[in-house]
Image (cartoon, rainbow, N blue to C red):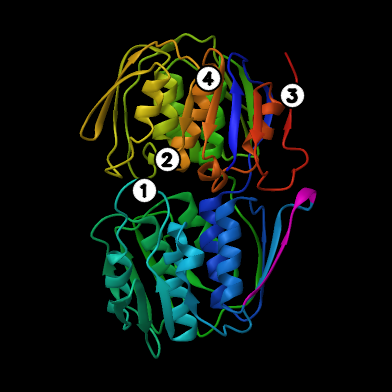
Amino acid sequence: MDKFVIRGGNPLIGTIRVSGAKNSALPCMAAAILTDEELILENIPQVRDIETERKLLASMGAQVEMCAGVSGHETILSCHSLSDPVAKYEIVKTMRASSLVLGPLIARAGAARVAMPGGCAIGGRPIDLHIKGLEKMGATIEQKHGYLEASAPRLHGAHIVFDKITVTGTEDLLMAAVLAEGETLLENCAREPEVVDLAALLTAMGADIRGAGTSTIRVRGVSRLHGARYRINPDRIEAGTFLVAGAITAGDLTVVGCNPKHLRAVVGKLEEAGAVIDSPAPDALRVRSNGKLRATDISTEEYPGFPTDMQAQFMALVTQAEGVSLIKENIFENRFMHVQELVRMGANIKVDGRTATVQGPARLSAAAVMCSDLRASASLVLAALIADGESIVDRVYHMDRGYEQIEEKLRGAGAEVQRMGNVFAPRSPELSTHTRV
């Protein structure tokens, strides 16, 4: 089992390039189910969840060719034949995004058998909102032996109001609606950039979608979709993680290949905490810090609010801030599992329900810590970058689900990070450039 060995104390100085967004790539790969023509996706990250999705689509009869390296991380998908419309448990048990194939399979094949999704144990992410919407569109769905079994001769348009904002629910029903008969009106939709990314791909494939990026989306169903070539958005959570890394290490780091518009909430809080951030190019953000950070409160919200996927990383940051910071987690009820490990490193954090109180600055010392989920992994790596001595971060397979070769990127900016164990993915060229200024 892989682990990172990290010696803290080095400021991150230089440039790091962001990979494509895993949370955009997964639904866009699922969208290949909707057409019998070839779909070419660019900027696909080399992470474990993408490999799982590839295996899932291949098990259904799809052809998936993944081309890595300087060519642009291109993936070519062809679902000309869906011989087995089943999302098998042994493939999807580690990935929450398995639910994203439910809507496309029903829309294209008229039937689906999908294992109940797995993924990080950060709280309930119920699939009932997917089911209720698909049933309104005419699907019959039953749960048997850990699987959702669904069928529909052809889905029809419907007026669907989500009981709560759900990213995967919005994406799943959006994909189902593009081939449904008539018009579908989706209200209380997620507004995340990943939803907009998916809608842009579907539009390039011939779908008729209006309102993506707002709370109301209208879809006029079409009889078929065609192939397309599309480039996935950069990963805003990876970019935010590196911005925090630059600030927490008192560095001077430029994050390139990102979309600054998607990071306004994160940038705002980093500036509130005392970091200096500017945009030297349309696709770049530079973060500088002298190490004197101020206590800052955050409250996680749906986009465009502060993302829950950045909460753990920001908590690591404010352990170094002067004063008391309050962190309130409003999205997932079990997303403070990194707290215990940060405390073992010397952080002063108290948790009461969904609120964590962080007293800083704390002098962190190296320790052996264990990752519990994807973003918790990132917070422990950030803490290790500033801890006295050599930390061992275990179970980094969680991090490999969503960060492409993060140890190489950090090392290229001056961090002392080594992976021990079996390396997950091949080395990717041009990940980072280390230049001291």
| Tag 1 near tag 4, CB within 8 Å | no
In the image, what residue occupies the spot 55% across and 51% down? 22
Label 4 sits on a secondary structure element that is: helix
Q: Quadrant of the C terminus?
A: top right
Give the distance between the C-alpha atoms of the residues marked 2 and 1, in whole angstroms: 8 Å
Q: Which residue is mark 2?
A: 372
**Residues packed near mark 3 inside 10 Å, few (<14), some (14 to 19) or many (20 plus):** some
Q: For label 4, count other residues whose C-alpha is less than 10 Å away and answer few (under 14), some (14-19) or many (20+).
A: many
Q: Position of residue 85 (x, y in %)?
A: 50, 80
Task: For marks 1 and 3, give the CA distance.
Answer: 36 Å
Mark 1 or 4, nearer chain start: 1
Residue identified by numbered label 1: 121
Is tag 4's residue or tag 3's residue first in the polypeptide sequence?
A: 4
- Which quadrant is home to the N terminus? top right
Kindly check if marks 2 and 4 are in contact, taking CB atoms under 8 A apart as contact: no
Which residue is depicted at the point 38% across and 54% down? 214
Q: State the residue position of label 4.
A: 247
Q: Nearer the viewer, mark 2 or mark 3?
A: 2
Which mark lies nearer to you, 2 or 4? 2
Which kind of residue does numbered mark 3 sit on? His
Left or right, residue 134 beside residue 355: right
* Amino acid type of the residue tagged 1 in the rendering: Ala
Question: Residue type at mark 4?
Answer: Ala
Q: Amino acid at mark 2?
A: Ser
Q: Measuring 55% from the left and 75% from the top, which residue is drawn there?
A: 33
Asked if disc 2 and disc 1 are in contact, CB closer than 8 Å, the reply is yes
Label 1 secondary element: loop
